[in-house]
Amino acid sequence: MFSSDVVVFILIMVSTSALGIWKGKSNHVEKRTSGELLLGSNVSIFSVALSVCSSFLSAVSLLGFPSEVYFRGTMITWFLPMYFLSFPIVAYVFLPPIYELKLTSLYQYLEHRFTFTNRMIAALLFLAQTLLYMSVALYAPALALSSCLPIPLVFSIFLTASLSAIYLFLGGARAGIYTSALQMLLILGSLFAVICASLIKFTPQEIFEKNLEGGRLIFFDFRLDPTIRHSFFSVFFGGATTIFGLFATNQLTIQRYMSLPNLRKAQLVVLLNVPMNSVVLLMYVIIGLIIFAEYFECHPDLTTKDQIFPTFVRDMLYIIPGLEGLFLAAIYGAGLSTLTASYNALTAVTIEDVIKILFAHFSKGKRQMADSCTYKLVQILPFVFAAFAVLMAIVVQYLDTMILQIAFSIFGGAGGASLGIFVVGIFCPWITSTKAAICSQLAAIFGTLMVVCGSFYYRVRAVDLPLNRGCDDSYLPFNFSTPLAGTVTANDSDSLSSKVSQISYQYYGLLGVIICLVVAHVVQAFDVITGSNKIKPVNKSHGKR
């Protein structure tokens, strides 16, 4: 990495961070409440939309999606039509009943609709899910930084985690939103720059022909086999469930929506994520195809598959001064955006669903936690979560799985169970049994957890498309065709538990929702027959503060 790249990287990171913190503090009263620190206020629609998009378009996706196309083809392109279906459903079906309650913690809804137990289960599940995902989101940019600069990986992890916490400490949620928005623009700019620079060497026709010969242009895999990793059905329907879990029933995004003054603006933020996510996904696919064209005749040596994009930038784009620094800034900025949103959401849930409840319990309801105390916790807790993320990120480097799949497994496994209980609460008003609500939630968690853990235990791995390793003069004509495209392998392919564990990770969220719905109706029917106690459905006034 040249000195010009280092200068570009440092200038971009310092300027975006400083501008984000300045915007977070400007035009704002000096004494901010804890609620303003947690949710943010007076933020533009476009900034919130960029921030929501960047919350999950982390360094994981920046490294993972091009790598997915390079090794396994373009079936992920089916996410595009899925976006046009799923985001409007989030905006007009899921968001209204949740937004109108105006809750700091999303999981307070479950207490109003069902029981306190459901709220605590969902809150603890979110804490576990986000802490696990943070480790992956932290590892990716830290790995990129340590690969390009003479910095030890552990120090890079520590530095990355600390910077995100400092953003929130200095400017609160408002600074986090503006910084994330700026870094989202940086991601878009860097991807566009990489594509334009690559087209200097390759024409679109050359890229198309090489990928066609290499078998990467895969769009029509309509196999119903649930173990096919990326079929039309797994990407479209499984992916839609993941979108619902991430953008409709996840504290990270709900917290962004709540920073807006009314429901219409919050819905517009959701809808703006259709073109934003579509543009980014198209760029990922194009870059994956360009990378394959570059290494069509000689696949490079890699320590992990997720290194293919940084390796491509280093090998091909070094001739343009500063471009590698821009790319590194994009990866690093993407990681910081995700971590900032995660710290903020974890802080809100911890305070509202854990600390305040414990405080009320031990004070026997005689006192409420002072706002000044909450204010201090909002500033301190991000550093606590940063310390935990550092420890977990160090563990991630020893997992022999692509980071994109790890992230989607976390979202699907935990997010599906959480989405399931919200689906029951919002769309099944006839489910009034306390037992039905609790049993369905626990069953969904247990069911998805068994499948996710089984995939790691049996070492379920996707079968890659063939790669050309003929890098010397003895190169022989290479056959890119394979009948195993899209399939997976496992250590024990005969046992029933192994076969279940081979289900595509795209279905994890859908599996959680189905389990939750089925168990809720079965237990509800049993309670109706036996005459057990019932509870009333939620009413809008329950959530008003």
Image (cartoon, grey):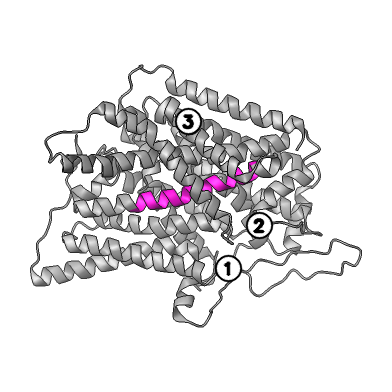
| Residue under numbered circle 1 | 461
Disc 2, SS: helix
* Magenta stretch contains residue 156: no
Query: Where residue 13 appears, x then y in whole percent?
Result: 60, 30
Secondary structure of the residue carrying tag 3 is: helix
- Give the label on residue 305, or none: 2
Residue found at x 85% / y 69%:
477
Let me know if residue 46 appears in the view.
Answer: no
Which is closer to the viewer, label 2 or label 3?
3
Q: Can you tell which quarter of the image residue 17 is in?
A: top right
Q: Does 128 appear above or below 526?
A: above
Label 1 SS: strand
At 33% across and 55% down in the image, what residue appears? 418
Say which amino acid is labelled 3: Ile
Disc 2 marks a residue whose amino acid type is Lys
Task: Place residue 25 in its image quadrant.
Answer: top left
With 40 as the anchor, is 179 left or right in this view? Answer: right
Residue pointed to by mark 3:
166
Q: Earlier in the sequence, mark 2 or mark 3?
A: 3
Say left or right for 79 vs 468: left
Q: Is residue 139 magenta?
A: yes
Extreme-bottom residue of the structure = 494
* Residue 9 picture location, percent across and down: 66, 32
Q: What span is in magenta?
A: 125-145
Tag nearer the camera, 1 or 3: 3
